[in-house]
Every structure is written in structure tokens, then in C-alpha cells.
Image (cartoon, rainbow, N blue to C red):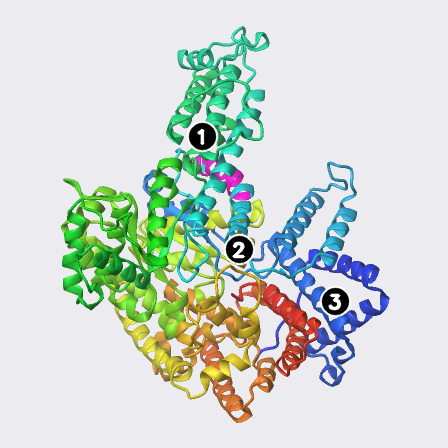
């Protein structure tokens, strides 16, 4: 095995690390600083292979509980600052991951900018923020981090002082000092309202200003003004799957807060626009439309009588303020001084703005025709409407089944719906959808579950009337497995008037199945073929022009392992594309990805480009959750880079010529079938077929302690069962990452590679198949972040040592096999040999993670032995926080 090259440390890391050391000395004292520095230097020497370092005392035993807490905070903050430094230096940036580069690449293949522009006019790209609990950091910590990033940007520009007169280096030190004294852990469990506010901060502070500016850049690159194809979405406040805390009230609250934010932003922009558009009729002419707007504004101020644009803006402001008042229920922060009628919808508001833009473009050879604040405001209205982000509804199919069964029984239609077979269910549900009679009655008494679900669809109908139809467009069905699962939701929508049986049936919400398990992914194409065969559904999808299907990465991984999960998703996507082509319906795939590789994590740019040919079709939605939201959208700069990358990848995946011939596609697919089968068998044998594995997992990893973290509003398991099948994918992946095994991201692959005899074919796949390249790249990153020697130490937590060492021995042997197999087919001498930036990033962190793991093990032993000192519990939670921060995509 080759020796790893020395790490060239990012200068920003040295700078920020030095300040952190000064802060620790200043606030913790010289003794604490020297203890932390000793532990750091010994760990660094050991990681670098310095002779004799393994025999030197780690220094951890000398730490009391108070010093342990301070030490863990210090290492966590270093990792946080190192992440910041690397993000600033573009360690995560990928070559060609922007629109301009994508257009050049396409042009080289004969795809014109006009072709690309035509695609984007029909496209949809939607990052969808979710509240999946993988972000361990408090918002306060992230805010300080972002302030440091802004100060570092000023420092890069050669500034020495801030606009307020503070010296920049001193201001950075101040923020790090504040970080040191900020409590990292939440004391109380999050409520849905907290999650709504967190997401709102990203939507308001990042997406609102960034997207209009990005569209300006894209217009210049395309030579064309595309429609608003990139629009954010959210699940927060509408995702009820396994979260009893989400209901009609949280739905309305989330929508109202979003509307408040976007209208307030528009009002601020209008106020600034009024100050800017000082054009006088004494020096310029204007159009009759602007004159009419000015005359209707009731702005009779003498100082503005020759300034029609300002008077028109005053009137537009008054109308938007009236809109705010009508929807939100109180005056905006800056009330209008003039009367005005509320706008009926965003389109009417946009129409007035467009009249201003047309008038500006009508003279001066178009100098004021494009760009500027007015152009950005128009783009914002087109993109965000009055709702800011489209909110999805999501619920489990089992819930819908129970609710519909109760409604049918209470209305006297069918006493035992649950006893019917699938064909009988479909026939009954279609009869109900064809008529106008409702199943629910205000005089009947229903279970809490049914009452809550009816309230949700009625709240969605009210939201359409209040915020516009774009506020909620999609209803996602978790655990969807049959056509009746989809029809049940249509029946519920009908109860609120969102599905109507007219001459041509209409549904105001698109019903979307989420295929999650391996079995569901395999059955998905047949379900969709039967769905499209229903005449009423064919009419609805025909009018809409597209249909969405969601595919889940997390549960398919937990169900079948990494390799089978990604291959099943690829196969399902291709099979679905064929079904959609048969029906003449455009396919829109919604990818339910997480941050960790075991949940679909890794590079979005590479992942989208690696999708099977013909499956992207210019329309893609992707979940963004937990720590990934802060990493991708924590600052405007990172948001710009990631939104550019997603858009560029979508263009390339849709318009680039396939890289594989039909013959290679066939033989590579056959090879993947074999690899997937063997990987699936090995994974299932360990996780679901090994006696005592459930006990081993729950004792070996900090799963119970993770469940105690206050990082989300929903429970760790869908039921009270301790079965792995009932555990959510997030804590499953998170806990293996903490113990440095990363099992969901690689287990089973090594055995599959070892069994495959034609290694030459595997190397051909590495060389020529983007799907296989992306699959192995993520696998390689996971292997590099795992540490079997360190993981073995967690076996002391397993009460039955024979069981613990036996199962861990299998895991370690499988890791060695996977490691050897990967290096063999990629022809590398060590992991990440061809990814030096990522290699350096991970190896930089390893010395800071190892002591955290060692302390975590000791604290877990004491906690599980019954010690009740509150500092032990806090230390465990801090260590989880610190390790997750250092690993970056652990959940």
C-alpha cells in the first residue's frame, strides 16, 4: 500500500485554528489550552505515523469531566472552522459544474444554446428542504459561522476594517470567542414551528436574493430569458409521515410564515425601487400604461408630480400592502400611506411591474431594459409567487387506508374496506371518484386520525384560495405499493374539493407515489402502468403534461444495502421511463436523498449526471435535509455554487448524448445485476439473518443516545418496536457513522466484487460508465472516513463479548475485502489516490476525530453502567455533535 502524501494545510485553517487556540487560552486558561494542545499534537503525530507516537499517552485520561466537555467543544469548533475554510477555498467545487461550462460542453456535441434554452423553458429543478433530523448544530452556531465567512470574504478583498469600523481580524476573533461561549446543544426538543423558522431563514436570507441574481447570470449565458425553472420546495409543516406533531395548524402556520416573509421582501424591494426610479417627465417620456398606474395610485404629492414611476410604485406598494393585510391579517412593518385594493394573485402584481419594465425599455436605446432591481423583483415574483416555496404534503399509505376505510364504513358504503382485495378496492374507489357525493359528514364522529387527515386536505384547499395553487401542488404517499394507495388519496382530496369528477376529471394536487424498499422499486413500473391505464387518471395527467414519481434512497439502502439500493434505483428509473413513454406522459423523478452515502448522499452534480439516459428529462426534484442544507445553502456563495451545479447537471443529463453503446449498456447492466444480487445476499445475511445482530447494533453504536438528541420534532422510529425494519433510516446511518463503521455505505460490496471473476469487465465499467464511477466514488469516500481499528474499540460496549467480537470480526473482514476490491478495480494503491483534495480534507480531520471517539466510548460505558452525573450525558451528546461536524455527511 502506498504512503499517503503529506497534507498541505489550507492557510485559512491555520489562521482560524490559531485564533481558536488564543480564544481557548483566554477563556479556558493556559492549563486547559496546554492539555488540549497536547492531545491534538499526539493524535496528529499518531495519524501521520511518527515513530513512537503509538506508545505515547493520549492525555485523555488526565481530563476531568469539565475539561472533557471543554476539550470536545474545542475539537468540534476546529472541525467547524476547517469546514468553513475548505468551503471558501472550493474544496468541494467540481470542474464544469456551472451553466456556462455545461453550455460549452453541449455545444461541442452539437447542442445549441437555443436547444438548451428551449429545454429550460419546460424544465423544473426543485431543491426541497426537509426537516429530517441530521443537523446537530444549533442555528446560533451556524449564524456565527456565517458571520466569520463574511468577514473572511472581506479579508480576501484586502479590507482591514468592516463598514462599521471594526478591525477585521479582531472581528473574526470576536465571533470565534462568541462561538466558544455559545451552548452547542439544544436543551429542548424541536417543535415543528422551530423547524419552519429554520428553513424560512434559508429561504428568506439566501434563496430570495440569490435566485433572481442567478437568473440574470443564466440569461446572459443563454442569450435568452428562460421561465423560472428553478424553484424551491419544502416538506416542513406538511410532512406527516411518522410525525404526529404535523397537522392542519402547522400546515397553515408554515404557509403563513412563508407568505409573510416573501411579501415583506417584495415590499422592501418596492420601497427601494421607488427611491431609485426618479425619472422626471421633464427629461423623459413614459408610456400610457405607466401614466395610468401613476394616476390610479392616489399619490398626489407635489414633490412627485413629474415622477410617474415613483407615483406608480407608490400605488403598487399600496396594493401589495393591502394584499399583505388581507392574507396575513395585520399591517406590514412599513404600512402604506395610500389606499389600494389587494392583488388577487401574483400574476396581477407581476403585470404592473412588467408595465414599468416595458416603459423603461421603450427609450434610451434600451439602456434600462434589462437587469437592475426591477428585473430582479419581477424574476422573484415569477419564482416565489406569494408562497415563497411550494409545500408538499406527505403521509404513509397505511394511514390513508385506515382513514378511507373508516369513511366508507361510517357513510354506509362499505363495512370492511380492509378486507377487499386490490381489484375490488380499485373498483370501489373509482366509483366514489366518479360521483359528487362526499363520504364525510359534519354529523358523524370519527377517530382522531381521520379527523386530522380530513383537516389537512381542507387546509390545503384553503391554502389554494389564500396563497395560490402553487403553494401546494403535490401529495406524496410513503410506502406506496398499489394503485389503490394512490386512489385513496384522490378520495381524500375529493372531500376538500381538490379532486373533482367533471366532464374531464381534475385534481388540483398531483398524487405522487414514493417507492422506497427494494420490493417497491421493483414493483413501481407495474403500478404506474396500471395507474396510467385508468381513463380518469390519463385525462388528469394528459392535461398536466407530466407526472412525478418519488424514489427513496434511505429505506432502500436499509432494506438491501448500498449497492443494491443504487442499482435498484437506476433500474426502476429506466423501467419507469419506458412506462411513461408508453403513456405519452413526461416523467418527473423526485429523488429522496440524504447527506450520507447510505442515504443517497455525495455529489449532486455527479449523481444527476450519472442518472440513466432518458430519466431526467429536464425535470428533477431533490430533497435537501439536515446538515446538507447548511453546507449547500448556508451562505449565498455556497448556494450559488450548488444551484449552478444542480442546473448544469440537469442540462447535461438531459441533453448530452449517452456515453455507453447499447452493447456496453447490456453487458454492464448484466454485471451490475450479478453484483447487486451478491451484495444484497451478503448484506441481508448480516443485518437480518444473523442471530443477535439487533442487540449488537443497539449496544455497539450510540443509537439510543442519538435518539435522545434534540435535533428534530419526530421520533427515531415509526413504531415502538426495536426492529431494524421499523427504525428510521437516519438514526440507522447516523449511528454507524458515529462508531466509524459507516456500514450502510459499503457492506456487501466487497463480497460482490470478490465473487465477480471478470475483473477486466469491472475495470471497463470504471472507465466508461458514469453510474459506476459515481457509485464507487461515494463508496471510496465512505471507506476513507471509516476506521476499523477505532471501531473495534466500540465492541467493549457489547455485553456479550463473544457476540460482539464475532459480529464485528465479520464486519472488519468485509471491510478489508471491500477495500481490496475497490483498489483492485480502480487500479489505485490507496484510497482517494486520485482525489487529492478530498483525501487531504479527510486526513486533516482524522486526528481530531479519534480522541472524540475514544472519549465517547468511555462516556458511553459510564452512562450505561448507571452513572448519573449530568456532565456524562452532556459529554456524550457533545461528542456526537463533534464527530458529526468533523465527518460532515454523517446523517
**Prevalent SS, magenta region:** helix
Is the residue 38 above or below the residue 104 in the image? below
Q: CA distance from mark 2 to mark 3?
A: 28 Å
Is the residue 677 above or below the residue 79 in the image? below
Question: Would you call the spot at circle 1 few (<14 residues within 10 Å), some (14-19), or many (20 or more)?
Answer: some
Place of residue 824 in the rendered image (x, y in percent of width and height, measured from the top left)? 45, 78
Q: CA distance from mark 1 to mark 2?
A: 28 Å
SS assignment at label 2: loop
Q: Which mark is residue 191?
A: 2
Can residue 211 be found in the magenta stretch? yes
For this rendering, which residue is in front, 696 or 575?
A: 696
**Residue stretch in magenta:** 206-220
Residue reaching furthest to the front? 443
User: According to the image, label 3 marks what residue?
Assistant: 70
SS assignment at label 3: helix
The reply, left or right, for residue 461 in relation to residue 41 is left
Residue 656 in view here: no
SS assignment at label 1: helix
Residue that appears at 51% across and 59% down = 713
The reply, left or right, for residue 459 in relation to residue 178 is left
Amino acid at each position: 500500500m502506498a504512503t499517503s502524501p503529506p497534507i498541505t494545510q489550507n492557510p485559512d485553517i491555520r489562521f482560524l485554528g490559531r485564533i481558536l487556540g488564543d480564544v481557548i487560552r483566554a477563556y479556558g486558561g493556559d492549563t486547559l489550552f496546554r492539555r488540549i494542545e497536547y492531545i491534538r499534537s499526539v493524535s496528529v503525530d499518531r495519524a501521520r505515523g511518527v515513530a513512537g507516537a503509538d506508545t505515547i499517552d493520549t492525555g485523555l485520561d488526565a481530563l476531568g469531566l469539565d475539561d472533557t466537555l471543554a476539550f470536545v467543544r474545542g475539537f468540534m469548533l476546529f472541525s467547524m472552522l476547517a469546514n468553513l475554510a475548505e468551503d471558501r477555498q472550493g474544496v468541494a467545487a467540481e470542474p464544469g459544474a456551472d451553466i456556462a461550462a455545461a453550455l460549452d460542453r453541449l455545444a461541442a456535441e452539437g447542442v445549441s444554446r437555443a436547444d438548451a434554452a428551449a429545454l429550460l423553458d419546460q424544465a423544473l429543478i426543485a431543491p426541497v428542504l426537509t426537516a429530517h433530523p441530521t443537523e446537530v448544530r444549533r442555528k446560533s452556531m451556524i449564524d456565527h459561522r456565517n458571520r466569520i465567512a463574511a468577514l473572511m470574504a472581506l479579508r480576501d478583498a484586502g479590507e482591514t476594517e468592516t463598514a462599521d469600523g471594526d478591525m477585521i481580524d479582531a472581528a473574526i476573533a470576536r465571533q470565534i470567542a462568541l462561538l466558544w461561549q455559545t451552548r452547542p446543544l439544544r436543551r429542548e426538543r424541536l417543535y415543528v414551528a422551530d423547524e419552519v423558522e429554520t428553513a424560512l431563514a434559508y429561504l428568506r436570507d439566501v434563496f430570495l436574493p440569490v435566485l433572481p441574481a442567478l437568473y440574470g447570470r443564466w440569461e446572459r449565458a443563454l442569450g435568452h430569458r428562460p421561465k423560472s425553472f428553478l424553484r424551491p420546495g419544502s416538506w416542513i409543516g406538511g410532512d406527516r409521515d411518522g410525525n404526529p406533531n404535523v397537522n392542519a395548524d402547522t400546515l397553515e402556520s408554515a404557509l403563513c410564515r412563508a407568505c409573510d416573509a416573501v411579501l415583506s421582501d417584495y415590499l422592501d424591494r418596492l420601497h427601494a425601487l421607488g427611491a431609485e426610479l426618479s425619472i422626471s417627465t421633464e427629461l423623459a417620456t413614459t408610456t400610457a400604461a405607466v401614466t395610468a398606474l401613476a394616476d390610479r395610485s392616489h399619490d398626489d404629492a407635489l414633490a412627485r408630480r413629474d415622477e410617474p414611476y415613483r407615483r406608480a410604485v407608490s400605488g403598487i406598494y399600496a396594493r401589495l400592502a393591502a394584499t399583505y393585510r388581507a392574507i396575513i391579517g395585520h399591517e406590514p412593518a412599513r404600512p402604506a400611506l395610500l389606499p389600494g385594493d389587494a392583488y388577487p394573485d401574483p400574476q396581477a402584481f407581476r403585470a404592473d411591474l412588467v408595465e414599468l419594465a416595458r416603459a423603461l425599455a421603450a427609450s434610451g436605446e434600451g439602456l434600462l431594459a434589462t437587469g437592475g432591481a426591477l428585473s430582479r423583483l419581477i424574476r422573484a415574483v415569477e419564482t416565489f409567487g406569494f408562497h415563497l416555496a411550494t409545500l408538499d404534503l406527505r403521509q404513509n399509505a397505511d394511514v390513508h387506508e385506515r382513514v378511507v376505510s373508516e369513511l366508507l364504513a361510517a357513510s354506509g358504503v362499505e363495512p370492511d374496506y380492509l378486507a377487499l382485495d386490490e381489484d375490488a378496492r380499485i373498483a370501489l374507489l373509482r366509483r366514489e371518484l366518479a360521483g359528487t357525493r362526499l363520504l364525510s359528514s359534519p354529523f358523524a364522529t370519527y377517530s382522531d386520525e381521520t379527523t386530522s387527515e380530513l383537516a389537512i386536505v381542507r387546509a390545503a384547499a384553503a391554502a389554494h384560495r389564500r396563497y395560490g395553487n402553487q403553494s401546494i401542488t403535490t401529495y406524496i404517499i410513503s410506502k406506496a405499493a398499489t394503485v389503490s394507495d394512490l386512489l385513496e388519496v384522490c378520495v381524500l382530496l375529493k372531500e376538500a374539493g381538490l379532486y373533482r369528477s367533471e366532464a374531464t376529471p381534475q385534481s388540483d394536487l398531483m398524487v405522487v407515489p414514493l417507492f422506497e424498499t427494494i420490493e417497491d422499486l421493483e414493483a413501481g413500473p407495474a403500478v404506474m402502468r396500471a395507474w396510467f391505464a385508468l381513463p380518469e387518471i390519463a385525462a388528469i395527467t394528459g392535461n398536466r403534461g407530466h407526472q412525478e414519481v418519488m424514489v427513496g434512497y434511505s429505506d432502500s439502502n436499509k432494506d438491501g444495502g448500498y449497492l443494491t439500493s443504487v442499482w435498484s434505483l437506476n433500474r426502476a428509473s429506466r423501467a419507469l421511463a419506458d412506462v411513461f413513454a408508453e403513456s405519452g406522459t413526461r416523467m418527473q423523478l423526485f429523488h429522496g436523498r440524504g447527506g450520507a452515502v447510505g442515504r443517497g448522499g455525495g455529489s449532486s452534480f455527479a449523481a444527476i449526471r450519472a442518472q440513466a439516459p432518458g430519466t431526467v428529462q429536464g425535470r428533477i426534484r431533490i430533497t435537501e435535509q439536515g446538515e446538507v442544507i447548511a453546507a449547500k445553502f448556508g451562505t449565498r456563495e455556497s448556494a450559488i455554487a450548488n444551484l449552478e451545479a444542480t442546473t448544469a447537471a440537469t442540462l447535461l443529463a438531459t441533453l448530452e448524448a449517452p456515453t455507453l453503446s447499447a452493447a456496453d449498456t447490456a453487458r454492464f447492466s448484466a454485471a451490475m445485476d450479478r453484483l447487486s444480487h451478491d451484495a444484497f445476499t451478503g448484506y441481508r445475511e448480516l443485518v437480518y439473518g444473523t442471530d443477535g445482530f439487533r442487540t449488537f447494533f443497539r449496544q455497539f453504536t450510540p443509537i439510543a443516545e442519538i435518539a435522545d438528541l434534540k435535533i428534530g420534532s419526530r421520533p427515531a422510529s415509526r413504531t415502538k418496536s426495536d426492529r431494524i425494519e421499523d427504525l428510521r433510516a437516519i438514526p440507522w446511518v447516523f449511528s454507524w457513522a458515529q462508531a466509524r463503521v459507516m456500514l450502510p455505505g459499503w457492506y456487501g460490496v466487497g463480497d460482490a466484487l470478490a465473487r465477480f471473476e471478470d475483473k477486466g469487465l469491472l475495470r471497463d465499467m470504471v472507465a466508461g460508465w458514469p453510474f459506476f464511477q459515481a457509485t464507487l466514488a461515494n463508496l471510496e469516500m465512505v471507506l476513507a472516513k471509516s476506521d476499523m481499528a477505532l471501531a473495534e474499540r466500540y465492541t467493549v460496549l457489547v455485553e456479550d463479548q463473544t457476540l460482539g467480537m464475532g459480529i464485528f470480526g465479520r464486519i472488519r473482514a468485509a471491510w478489508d475485502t471491500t477495500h481490496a476490491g475497490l483498489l483492485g478495480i480502480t487500479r489505485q494503491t490507496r484510497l482517494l489516490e486520485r482525489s487529492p483534495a478530498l483525501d487531504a480534507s479527510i486526513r486533516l480531520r482524522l486526528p481530531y476525530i479519534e480522541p472524540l471517539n475514544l472519549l465517547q466510548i468511555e462516556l458511553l460505558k459510564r452512562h450505561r453502567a448507571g452513572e448519573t452525573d449530568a456532565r456524562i450525558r452532556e459529554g456524550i451528546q457533545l461528542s456526537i455533535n463533534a464527530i458529526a461536524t468533523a465527518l460532515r455527511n454523517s446523517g
